[in-house]
Structures are given as structure tokens and as C-alpha cells.
Image (cartoon, rainbow, N blue to C red):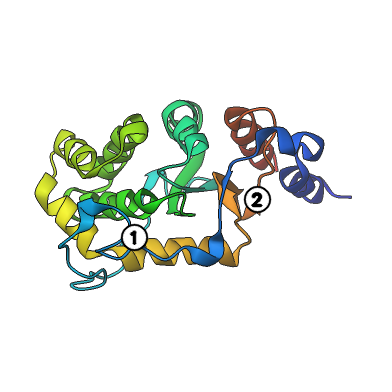
Amino acid sequence: MTKQTSRRWLLRGLGVGAATALAGCTGNLTNGSAPAADGPTGDTQGAETPGSGEASLLAEPTLGDLDAPVVIEAYTDYMCGHCSTFHLDTLPKVEEKYLSTGDVYYIHRDFPIPLNEWSWNVAMAGRSVQASEGMDAFFAFSKAAYERQSAMSWKTIEDAARTVGADPKAVVAEAKAGTHRPTVTADRQSGIDRGVRGTPTFFVNGQELVPEKSWWYTVDTGLQAALEE
């Protein structure tokens, strides 16, 4: 077995015996369409039908050096507690250890399972921020949204948008209208096509990581293995 083959097996099979100890968030992927404007929450009453005024697909939000030898993709749901842990605790460590050195390129993928209607709403709001304010604002909005995950509402989304300099009313209006639903849908479908069943799910240079011990341990070990190939 070559070193390269061995490393790939490590990425795919890392910690199989302990994987169940670090299960992420899962749900019914066959019922994952974006919520209608008059959906389960009264907050959405009177909004436009999702899909009206849809924008072109946005580029994936990224961090780091495009020419980095290792690429990590993270499929996440804004209402998943495990994803909150990753974004608030693990991603900053990834930025410090791997992105700042130019060794790793990070790609965000939206994957609303959904756990509830906010899985879609926050994802679409985040893409509205990206479209109007850029990548840095998108990641700042995501951080603010995860910090307020337990109290999610349209007001919470407005507050998060305001903190990054976006127009809070416009962000909420676009989320309710489903302006960036095609972008979120495309991300989600790409995950389904790759066998993603829950969040967070990570791919390093195209190979899925199997979770073990903690999200930082999983990602750190996987990135180190890829860098050593």
C-alpha cells in the first residue's frame, strides 16, 4: 500500500470505532425544501413567495489561499448545535493554524437539513449579506447567527445583519422572498449527491472525514494527514 493510498484510507476511516460518540445533527432529508412564505412561523406571513426575484447563483464563501495544497469543505446547518461548536470554537483554530500559513483553503457549504424553518431562513439571509457586503461580512454574520442560535427569530437575523454593516430590513426581505434560495439549494444538493446525511460534514481534498473525539480533533487530524501526503 502506497503512502498516498494509506493517507486516503486514514481520511475515510479515521476513528470508525468511535464515530458514534460524535454524531452530528441529522433529519429527514426527503422533506428539505425551503419554507414557504406563509409557512409554519407567523413571522413569515405576508412575505413574497420564495423564488420570486431570485438572484444568480453566488460563489461559495471561502477563506484562505486559493492555491493552498489542501482544501476543506464544511457542510453545515445554522440550527445545528454541533455546527455552532464548529463555527465558534473549531473554525477559529483552523484559521490560526492552517489558513494563516497558506496551507489550507476553506469552503463553506450550506446544508439545511432542515432542523426547523430557520435552517433555511438563516442560510438565505447569510447569502443576502454575502451578495451585498462580501465574504468577510458573510463569515461575520455567520458567527453572529451562531452566537444567537438559541434565540433565532427575524429580529435576531436583523441584529446579526446590522452588526456586520448590512441593511437588516433588506436582508430579511430577501430571505423571506427566497432571493438566494437557488444558491442554498445547489449547495444542499451537492451534499446529498456526495452522500451527506447530517451536519457538520467535512471533506478534505474530496475525501470525507469520519468524526472522532471532537470536531477539532477530527478536522485537525484530517488536515495534517492531507498535508503529509
Q: Residues within 10 Å of mark 1 (few under 14, many from 20)?
A: few
Which residue does the image show at 31% across and 31% down from the upper left?
A: 148
Which residue does the image show at 55% across and 66% down from the upper left?
A: 30
Please tell me the numbered disc located at residue 59: 1
CB contact under 8 Å: marks 1 and 2: no
Image vertical order of residue 25 relative to residue 96, above or below: below
Image coords of residue 183 (percent x, y): 35, 64
Image vertical order of residue 37 relative to residue 89, above or below: below
Image coords of residue 45 (percent x, y): 19, 59
Image vertical order of residue 64 relative to residue 37, above or below: above
Image coords of residue 187 (percent x, y): 44, 61
Instruction: Using the image as rendered, state which of residue 9 and residue 40 is in the foreground.
Output: 40
Based on the displayed image, in which of its 4 quarters is residue 150 positioned?
top left
Image coords of residue 176 (percent x, y): 22, 59
Question: Is residue 4 visible to us here?
Answer: yes
Q: Which residue is mark 2?
A: 208
